[in-house]
Amino acid sequence: MIKRMLATTALGLVLSACTTTGGASMEDTAMETTETSTDVAIPEATGVFAQESTLPFHAPDFSKIKDSDYLPAMKQGMAIQTAEVDAIKNNPAAPTFENTVVALEKSGRMLTRVLNTFYGVVGANTNDTLDAVDAEISPQLAAHSDAIMLDPQLFARVKAVYDNRAATNMTPEDATLLEKTYERMVHAGAELTPAQKEQVKKINGELSTLTTQFSQRLTDATKAGALVVDDKAKLAGLSDGDIASAAKAAEERGMAGKYLLPLQNTTQQPQLAELTDRSTREALFNASWDRAEKGDANDTRALIKQIATLRAQKAALFGKPDWASYVMYDRMVQSPAAAMKFMEQMVPALAATQRAEAAELNATIKADGKNFTVKPWDWNMYSEKVRKAKYDIDENATKPYFEIHRVLEDGVFYAANQLYGLTFKKRTDIPTYSPDVWTYTVYDKDGSELGLFYFDPYQRDSKRGGAWMSNFVDQSFLFDEKPVIYNVLNIPKAAAGEPQLVSFDNVETMFHEFGHALHGFFAHQEYPSLSGTAVARDFVEFPSQINEMWASDPTVLAHYAKHYKTGETIPTALIDKIKEAAKFNQGYALGETMEAAMLDMKWHSLSAQQAAAVNVDAFEKKSLDSLGLETDLVPPRYRSSYFRHIFTNGYAAGYYSYLWTEMLAKDGSQWFRDNGGLSRKNGDHFRETVLSQGGTKEYLPMYRAFTGHDPEVEPMLESRGLVGGDDAK
């Protein structure tokens, strides 16, 4: 998952101030923002964030940053940007692209520096102090954003430049920056009446508070929802290493002698594939399913209703029937109806596959001498039994070949070297926010420094669930900045002295997130707000998903999949089994994602009146029942109460993008295979046509430039092993 730093704040669309770091001092920046001097005084910046870091690539210097530094720095950064924007709008010179649009792009450098760092740490290593800062600053950031985006004097200048664009000599990227700046201000409400603008401001402030509360409650609920087991026998089926990790996790929470299974962010939990005690499986599933619906301080349902209602109310101010219609204006798929049609056409084949898989699992349960039918907490364990029987493959037999350091350095990095000529050097001189974070300098194919990479793999209570990529520093030629990028995962950490072995799912996640990183590292833009991953929600997952294909590429696998004890390369027969098994259980794997995506669209297709009257539990059940899928057996990957993607992380009416971009990625992967697979020629072509373009091009023409044709759904359906491909076209 991609997570732009400000996705959790109302500043997400404001300016480059939301997406860049480093560069000239505040005083220098202010001097550059006008062609004619004004009387606006720019406040002096002080503190650790006043100037860019002196570390390589201007990476944040965590050795100097204290929790108490963030709040005053953010307030100071807002004051400085406010003065910079005042200088732009009060400039007596006629509006030009340079003195208005570029000047706007240059504003807010200090604010960006602190926000990029703060939200990176809050997501990966938060604490009560940082959570309190987040809660306090969120509505202030929303108000700051609104003050800029809804300022009539500023918009008049931007509109004047926009209206005169045909007579202005601009580069294609200049023209894109102008167009997107204008569109974002209109979308924020610049053309609304003064009364409507006040309503938008009020809603934005309330939403910033509520989404922050949702995120914090869910983090607490996920931590509190971990399953505590008293009897080791109840953990039968787990490896000795996993049991040792569970004992250590319990001890760290003051429960010595017990065992604790922390929850990951999704409905299904990895241990459900291995636990042989059915009561433990059911308890773990229910702990996950009910984590944020216990009627306590961590219950998120009231927040969901408020968020959905406010979003619909805001959409109505723009004349839109619902949030989905409002927010999809800049997507590759530009309407909720088109997104739903794309998904609904796959439902018949998917439902048939789910029913067939359930019947197969029930037969296996019966053959196992058990007298029950499959439930969600049984599915993964019995599907693993079927997988072993069908493909003679056992995940515990593959894990010894996937040691995390080797996967990263000899797998993920090796594929990047073969495709793009990149090389990597591990560093120990860069301060990090956690001792479990690794850093690497990334070198381009000509040996020049490309950027800095942080890798934070392990699960901890202070980290939100899931996996994501974002930037501490965005690439831009405007500020002569190279990217500083991080990948964050949630892999349970092995007990001390144990090898850090990972599942193949984790391996694919590592390749996925590094696909986002490549999109950021190959950014080649003048303007930071168009740089790298600054693209539509339903395009941004495409580069990351296509990078997953190299995890199972035979050449790449042979390079990194080495037994941690013997050094033996993974046998070809086992590789073949992994690839053959990839199509197995797709009724579940595709189904849980499809259900979550459709549930998201149901929530964000509500009118304000409907949302205000909704009962969260009843609406969720009715929505799931209406999908035509076997949701009682295959529950959604996320239910509403812990759907962080859509209620705080910017994927509202956008979770379908994982499916849409999977279609792009599978079709694009077919292009790689048709043209010889893993090669520098192919990698350079993908870099030139897609990875280096940032948000400067239209998405369909960009895709055509890569593959030579429009995206086709058949490769996705074939990879999923689904029948009825023609019907889903």
Image: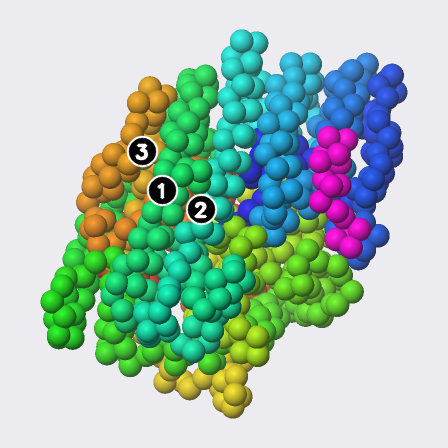
Q: Residue 459, can we see it?
A: no
Instruction: Give the image location of residue 721, x and y in percent.
Output: 27, 63
Q: Which residues are magenta?
A: 61-77
Q: Secondary structure at mark 3?
A: helix
The residue wearing badge 1 is: 294
Q: Residue at x 37, y 66 (%)?
A: 230
Q: Is residue 721 left or right of residue 549?
A: left
Q: Residue at x 42, y 86 (%)?
A: 571
Q: Earlier in the sequence, mark 1 or mark 3?
A: 1
| Mark with earlier residue (3, 2) | 2
Is residue 298 depicted above or below 481 in this figure? above
* Front one among 610 and 694: 610
Question: Magenta region, mostly helix, strand or loop?
Answer: helix
Inter-mark Cα distance, 3 to 2: 18 Å
In space, the residues marked 1 and 3 are separated at their CA atoms by 14 Å
Q: Is residue 511 left or right of residue 714?
A: right
The nearer-to-camera label among 3 and 2 is: 2
Q: Nearer the viewer, mark 1 or mark 3?
A: 1
Q: State the residue position of label 2.
A: 221
Q: CA distance from mark 2 to mark 1?
A: 9 Å
Instruction: Residue 277: name its quadrant.
Output: bottom left
Q: Position of residue 497 (x, y in %)?
A: 57, 79
Q: From this view, report whether residue 451 is shown above or below residue 701.
A: below
Q: Is residue 237 shown to the viewer in this render?
A: yes
Q: Nearer the viewer, residue 367 or 488?
A: 367
- Contact between marks 2 and 1 (CB within 8 A): the answer is yes
- Near-viewer residue (479 or 286): 286
Q: Which residue is mark 3?
A: 616
**Amino acid at dot 2:** Ala
